[in-house]
Amino acid sequence: MTTKVGATPLMSHTMTGGVLSSGAAAATDWKCIEGAFGGIVGAHICGNYNFGSNFTNESTYTPTATGATVTIGGDDMSLGAPQTLANAYSNLTLSNLGGGNWMLSNGVVGVGGYDFNFNVVVPVPAAVWLFGSALGLMGVARRRTAA
């Protein structure tokens, strides 16, 4: 997932083996990858720090599936907690939009946070197909006995 400011990428999240729910998020691998926007404004979006007055990134952000670390260097300044799988994707709300359409959201739906829209296709149970086949075969058998 890539978040943008206009056409400029803010950051991207990648996830493998993710489990998102109304509880704690989990994944086998998760990363926040810095986009071009942070460098333009002198900040690291994933690490949540600014580059200080020299406008140079002298810090290190290291994301993992279980958290993230930030080592502040030079005159960089922390602005708060870095982005992690847990603080970005835990405690999602599931909303039924109707017609088999659902949304997972961690903010105000359609206004802020992340919205994941998906459609759940409900398969026709195998029993329905087997029942239809049985009816067809009964019709064939009935025609044979009538002839």
Image: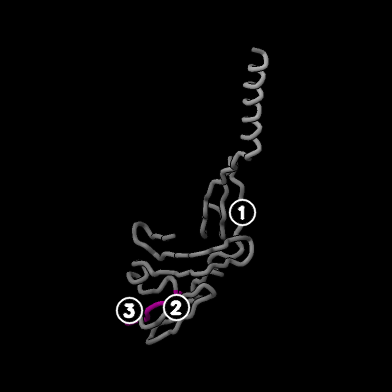
Q: CA distance from mark 3 to mark 2?
A: 20 Å
**Label 1–label 3 contact, CB within 8 A:** no
> What label sits on residue 94 in the rendered view?
1
The amino acid on which the numbered mark 1 sits, given as a three-letter code, is Leu
> Given the current orientation, which residue lies at the most extreme top position?
147
Marked residue nearer the N-terminal end (1 or 3): 3
Q: Is residue 136 left or right of residue 82?
A: right
**Residue at x 34% of width, y 72% of height:** 39
* Vertical placement of residue 18 versus 99, above or below: below
Residue extent of the magenta highlight: 47-55
* Vertical placement of residue 142 versus 74, above or below: above
The amino acid on which the numbered mark 2 sits, given as a three-letter code, is Thr
Q: CA distance from mark 2 to mark 1?
A: 30 Å
Q: Is residue 3 left or right of residue 107?
A: left
For the stretch drawn in magenta, the main secondary structure is loop
Task: State how the image is colored.
Answer: one colour
Whole-percent x and y of residue 97?
Answer: 59, 45
> Given the current orientation, which residue lies at the most extreme bottom position?
74
Whole-percent x and y of residue 45?
Answer: 42, 71
**Residue bearing the label numbered 2:** 62
Magenta region includes residue 110: no
**Residue bearing the label numbered 3:** 55
Disc 2 crowd, CA 10 A, few/some/many (<14, 14-19, 20+): some
